[in-house]
Amino acid sequence: MNWYQSLYDKTKPGSKVRFAAALIFAQCCASLAYAAEPPFAIKSEQVLLFDSDTGSVLFSRKADIPFPPASLAKLMTAEIAFNALKAGQLQPETAFSVSEHAWRTGGAPSRTATMFARLNSQLTVSDLIQGITVQSANDGAIVLAEGMSGSEQAFAQKMTERAQALGLKNSVFINPTGLPQDGKQQVTLSDMVKLARHLHDSYPQYYPLYSQESFSWNNILQRNRNPLLRLNMGADGLAMGGTQDAGLSIIASAEQNGRRIYLGLNGAKSVQDRTEDAEKLIRWAMNDFVKSPVFSANTEVAQASLYGGTQGSVGLMVHDAISVLVPVQDKAKLRSQVIYQGPVAAPVAKGQEIGRVQIMRDKEVLLERPVYAAQDVNEGTLRNKSLDALYELTTGWIRRLLK
């Protein structure tokens, strides 16, 4: 039995083609599965639960709807600092001064999360980063921003530019703290979970700061604000936020037995609801899913139509193995589709990226991977091209009727 069945038609060059494929196991005709909903109530309005190993979205609810980040903005603030440290543009022992603006806006007078840094005192980059990651300190974020870029505004512009470079397409930052300010400051759970994964994978020397239990500075001991760290489920980060209008949020990560889960929540009505939702979802992801293969490495998954080649189609293959996590209970069928711009114009080189294969539950894309040409195909003769053009002329009207 084949792993897939391709349903496709020829279309004009440059148009978007979708190959729908029903994923089928060879054994016992058992279909792949995915849970539409967790088997318990989730009070948060927005959710994204993501498995890092397979790249599977385990559960998603309004994950791409923007909301104000509040203290989640400090994840981007930390990324800017981590990246500068990694590049040697910033040193841990470099000291920055506490301006009056930083002191009033994020220090003791602000009555917000703070390191209680004294006006005009000097703080090292190392201490500032610990204050930001462990205590979510607003004064620490402002001092770091002013020290690195001269002002909050200049630093926030750098944050937004860096976010775009990392593929966080729907994130805009106005300041390094997430504190309310004129301007449209927004993020999405999809962007923040992507950022959390980037922080873990790109900065292994700094990421452990997010699981540091406490931090003492200026003779003041403060515990990490993340309650998930103390629930014995492998949680090791990252940040919490919340606004009166949008509700409470959290970006979390946990690792058990070599499996890493990322979770984004927003719209919880209380701290208790946020913590309970996060704990339930992480334990569910860790305990109630099993890993199932979809495609083996170097497997052909579909055929792409060719225009002007020595043959009419070329095989499309994945380079790496693709697996998804499937729930033990509450199952629903998965399908796959390959999307590319086609027919593909010849010549085609083996290994040339042609499109993307998507693994889907209903209309929701769970994961996406590139597909590549499985062989070389040379440019055809004038007769080949004429036949392809004739095919397009005689069948194109059918496609247009189906649009």
Image: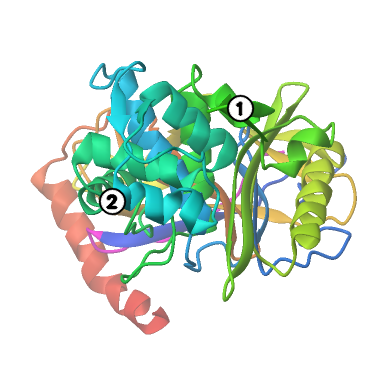
The C terminus: image quadrant: bottom left
Q: Is residue 383 left or right of residue 223?
A: left
> For the image shown, how many numbered marks are present on the structure?
2
Label 2 packing within 10 angstroms: few (<14), some (14-19), many (20+): many
Q: Residue furthest bottom?
A: 401
What quarter of the picture does the N terminus occupy?
A: top right
| Residue 375 visible at all | no
Name the amino acid, label 2. Ala
First of labels 1, 2 by sequence position:
2
Q: Who's the residue at 24% across and 35% down the image?
A: 148
Q: Is residue 110 above or below residue 90?
A: below
Q: Which residues are magenta?
A: 1-14
Residue at left offset 58%, top offset 34%: 134
Please state which of residues 208 and 62 is positioned toward the viewer in this rendering.
Answer: 208
Give the amino acid at mark 1. Answer: Phe
Image spot of residue 314 (x, y percent): 36, 39
Q: Residue drawn at (51%, 19%), measured in percent from left and top? A: 204
